[in-house]
């Protein structure tokens, strides 16, 4: 629609685009319109106008400022992590064959590639029966144990139970129980498909602090020696699936960028419409012409009945009207940008993870610029760069369970490091994070992502963990009364921009 509206003769352009798409086409796409505007088959003779993006005085009053990821000036409480990204310095020349959008952006869609894996939309089979839960935990164990068996001489629990005292032993298992002894040591019970076995971690071992970072149901490997009666293993080392320290991420072959955002919360009285307008206006500028992808990690709308007395903080009380308004805001984004969206806990999908993508009615409402909608989580590959998108509800649990130096709301990327280390986006079952039993565990990180993108906690944080860029992208909602009551001070109106050719990142502020 943006392309059509920018043409000198929109009515003729629309008619020609429909003709170009063909009588049997399900929908007219942006490519059909571009073919007409570029002088392809059935092209209109009318020239295409390329006006600058309209910027009202109100929007111009808040021109976006640029904040490089080399400095934590976004928020004094936000750390840039172990390995700080810096603003990219790659050549800024345009590709040889480009098309110009009505906003003045130049891009060559033929250079793009976008694919999605791990989308479980339409694949849900769980009924909630006991057998379903057994199946999903077996799948989790098999996937994660494969990543650990090469590091230890693994034996099943039932085999270890039959070994003689004093023998060397190793086991891979899911954490079934964690408790401290009267002497301050840690007893960790591991479970595999054959049974359970207790493992004792002495408090004076140099890896004992790792026990404080364990979550129930995550998968680890231990090595040690059996006690004289062979009833317990004294642990000498612990291993996590983890990201290899030697991991080298994939990068794009050209200078192209992706904007990573989340938690728009349209429908809330605190939705920052002016900040969104400034962001959308900036995307139309020459400065942003390299931003060819927009990834939205959930909570497009505020939802209804998500928390107590939410109706008192709603600007739009009907959930479908909220999505209609979100769609209107999405239309402000340049039509040549590829958009991918996943749901979050405020969206109109089931709360249990993995969350399938939206139903057809909501997809039709949000069908702007041919936006792609996939499940939470999903992996989106942009020109060879693998971006794991996960809304991030489990971050609440990680932050609540682990020590503050390992995970906190002020440094949300550190909690993301823990999920990368465990190679699972929501390892703990039975807590605040609702998990759905499926035929397989869609929440396992079987492949190492190049970028890990989350939202949910409304805090901005980023850094690199073993060369994986972890980004929590903040929100587009000012502080609500509910957030005040639970001491959430949001980072609002920020847009992390990632250079896909270097994985360097710049944060832009629009609030």
Image (cartoon, rainbow, N blue to C red):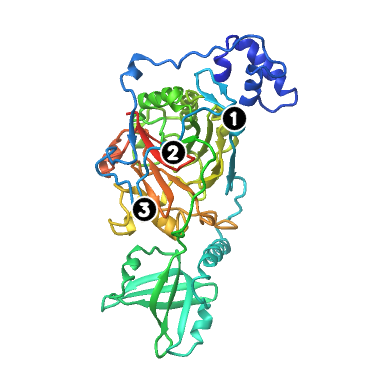
Q: Which residue is mark 3?
A: 415
The image quadrant of residue 77 is top left
- Secondary element under disc 1, as helix, strand or loop, is helix
* Image quadrant where residue 310 sits: top left
Q: Is residue 332 above or below residue 479?
A: above
Q: Nearer the viewer, mark 2 or mark 3?
A: 2
Q: Nearer the viewer, mark 1 or mark 3?
A: 1
Task: Give the residue pinned by disc 1.
Answer: 109
Picture quadrant of residue 494: top left
Separation of disc 2 and disc 3 at Cα? 20 Å
Exactly how many numbered labels are in the figure?
A: 3
Q: Which quadrant would the N terminus be assigned to in this image?
A: top right
Task: From the viewer's perspective, tell me whether residue 389 is left or right of residue 177.
Answer: right
User: Foreground: 436 or 338?
Assistant: 338
Q: Is residue 25 left or right of residue 222?
A: right
Residue 485, given in percent of the width and then of the height, sits at: 26, 42
Q: Is residue 439 above or below residue 457?
A: below
Task: Please tell me how crowded label 1 is: few (under 14), some (14-19), or many (20+) other residues with Cα within 10 Å.
Answer: some
In the rendered view, tell whether residue 259 sits above or below residue 36.
below
> What percent of the width, then of the height, locates residue 4?
58, 17
User: Would residue 511 appear left or right of 142 to someone viewing this image?
Assistant: left
Tell me the number on the disc at residue 498.
2
Q: Secondary structure at mark 2?
A: strand
Q: Position of residue 349 (x, y in %)?
A: 51, 42
**Left or right relative to 168: residue 1:** right
Q: Does label 2 or label 3 sit earlier along the sequence?
A: 3
Depth order, front residue of 466/182:
466
């Amino acid at each position: 629609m943006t392309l059509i509206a920018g043409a000198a003769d929109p009515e003729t352009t629309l008619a020609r685009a429909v003709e170009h798409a063909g009588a049997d086409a399900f929908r007219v796409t942006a490519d059909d319109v571009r073919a007409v505007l570029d002088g392809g088959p059935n092209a209109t003779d009318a020239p295409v106008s390329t006006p600058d993006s309209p910027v009202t005085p109100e929007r111009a009053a808040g021109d976006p400022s640029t904040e490089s990821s080399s400095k934590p000036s976004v928020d004094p409480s936000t750390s840039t992590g172990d390995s700080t990204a810096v603003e990219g310095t790659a050549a800024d020349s345009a590709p040889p064959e480009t098309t110009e959008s009505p906003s003045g952006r130049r891009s060559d869609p033929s250079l793009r590639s976008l694919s999605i894996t791990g989308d479980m939309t339409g694949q849900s089979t769980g009924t909630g029966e006991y057998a379903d839960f057994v199946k999903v935990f077996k799948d989790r164990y098999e996937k994660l144990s494969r990543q650990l068996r090469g590091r230890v001489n693994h034996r099943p629990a039932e085999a270890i139970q039959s070994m003689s005292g004093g023998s060397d032993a190793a086991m891979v298992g899911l954490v079934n129980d964690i408790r401290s002894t009267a002497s301050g040591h840690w007893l960790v019970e591991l479970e595999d498909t054959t049974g359970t076995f207790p493992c004792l971690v002495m408090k004076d071992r140099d890896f004992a602090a790792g026990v404080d970072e364990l979550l129930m149901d995550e998968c680890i490997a231990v090595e040690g020696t059996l006690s004289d009666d062979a009833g317990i293993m004294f642990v000498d080392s612990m291993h996590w699936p983890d990201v290899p320290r030697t991991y080298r991420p994939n990068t794009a072959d050209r200078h192209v960028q992706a904007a990573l955002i989340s938690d728009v919360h349209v429908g809330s009285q605190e939705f920052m419409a002016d900040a969104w307008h400034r962001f959308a206006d900036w995307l139309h500028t020459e400065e942003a012409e390299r931003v060819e992808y927009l990834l939205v990690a959930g909570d497009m709308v505020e939802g209804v009945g998500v928390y107590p007395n939410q109706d008192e903080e709603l600007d739009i009380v009907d959930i479908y009207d909220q999505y209609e308004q979100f769609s209107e805001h999405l239309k402000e984004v340049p039509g040549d940008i590829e958009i991918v969206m996943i749901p979050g806990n405020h969206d109109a999908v089931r709360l249990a993870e993995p969350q399938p993508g939206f139903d057809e009615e909501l997809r039709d409402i949000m069908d702007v610029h041919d936006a792609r909608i996939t499940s939470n989580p999903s992996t989106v590959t942009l020109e060879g760069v693998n971006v794991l998108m996960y809304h991030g509800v489990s971050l609440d649990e990680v932050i609540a369970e682990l020590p503050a130096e390992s995970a906190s709301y002020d440094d949300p990327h550190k909690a993301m490091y823990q999920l990368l280390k465990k190679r699972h986006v929501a390892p703990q079952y039975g807590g605040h994070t609702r998990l759905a039993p499926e035929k397989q565990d869609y929440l396992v990180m079987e492949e190492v992502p190049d970028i890990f993108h989350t939202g949910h906690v409304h805090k901005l944080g980023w850094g690199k963990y073993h060369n994986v860029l972890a980004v929590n992208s903040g929100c587009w909602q000012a502080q609500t009364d509910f957030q005040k009551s639970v001491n959430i001070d949001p980072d609002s109106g920020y847009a992390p921009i990632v250079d896909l050719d270097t994985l360097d990142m710049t944060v832009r502020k629009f609030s």
